[in-house]
Image (spheres, helix red, strand yellow):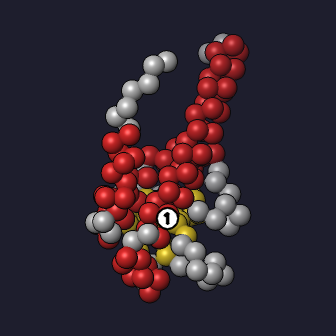
Amino acid sequence: MEAKEITRRLIKGSHAIDRMRAEVSETVKMLIGFVNNCDRRQIIIKTTREFGSDLCKWSIGHYYGQGNKLQVKCWLKEKFWESYAFSSYPNEIPFHTCNVKPVYMSLYVLVEGLLKTFPELEEYWKPLINASFVKFDV
């Protein structure tokens, strides 16, 4: 690969990582907001909920030292261990570049788990789902 192509790919990759990083943070904050509006929110206060797949494990709950705020965490599964990859509290753990794409690709696991725990979320996010079909002129 030529230096010009490498440069172009570095720039494009950097933009993609920045976008995915922002979308993960924004989506998680939005989901926490939706869960905070649920009548059955108290089930998370008592017990942290975990949702997993072959690639990752997400959790949502109240963690010590965070007051009355919900926190979302993500671990990526390796062959013999799990690595802590993301926290909705950005000062708790750095969101490393190598973890951004796998966390981004696994967001559906969190959404699926939250929907099973809080079926009423479907009503909360219906306006956003409907808006996603709007096409804008470019």
Q: Can I make out residue 27 in this image? A: yes
Residue 32 vs residue 75, the one in the foreground: 32
Whether residue 95 is situated above or below residue 13 in the rendered picture: below
Question: Is residue 36 shown left or right of residue 13?
Answer: left
Number of numbered discs: 1
In percent of the image, x 64 and y 54: which residue is there? 95
| Residue 135 in the figure: left or right of residue 100 | left
Q: Amino acid at mark 1?
A: Ile
Find residue 134 and report its image quarter: top left
Residue occupying image coordinates x 61% and y 26%: 12
What residue appears at the point 39 percent right and 71 percent down from the top-left corner?
38
Q: Position of residue 19 (x, y in %)?
A: 58, 38
> Is 49 placed above or below 76 here?
below
Compared with residue 77, is residue 24 higher up or lower down, i.e. above or below?
Answer: above
Question: Can you see residue 109?
Answer: no
Instruction: Point out residue 78 in the picture as x, y percentages from the top left corner.
Output: 47, 58
The image quadrant of residue 34 is: bottom left
Q: Residue at x 44, y 24 (%)?
A: 136
From the top left corner, tell me how far across and down residue 6 is, in percent: 66, 20
| Mark 1: secondary structure | helix
Is residue 96 or residue 27 the one in the foreground?
27
Which residue is label 1 attached to? 32
> Residue 90: horizontal and vertical position, in percent?
67, 60
Mark 1, Cα crowd under 10 Å, few <14 / some 14-19 / many 20+, is: some
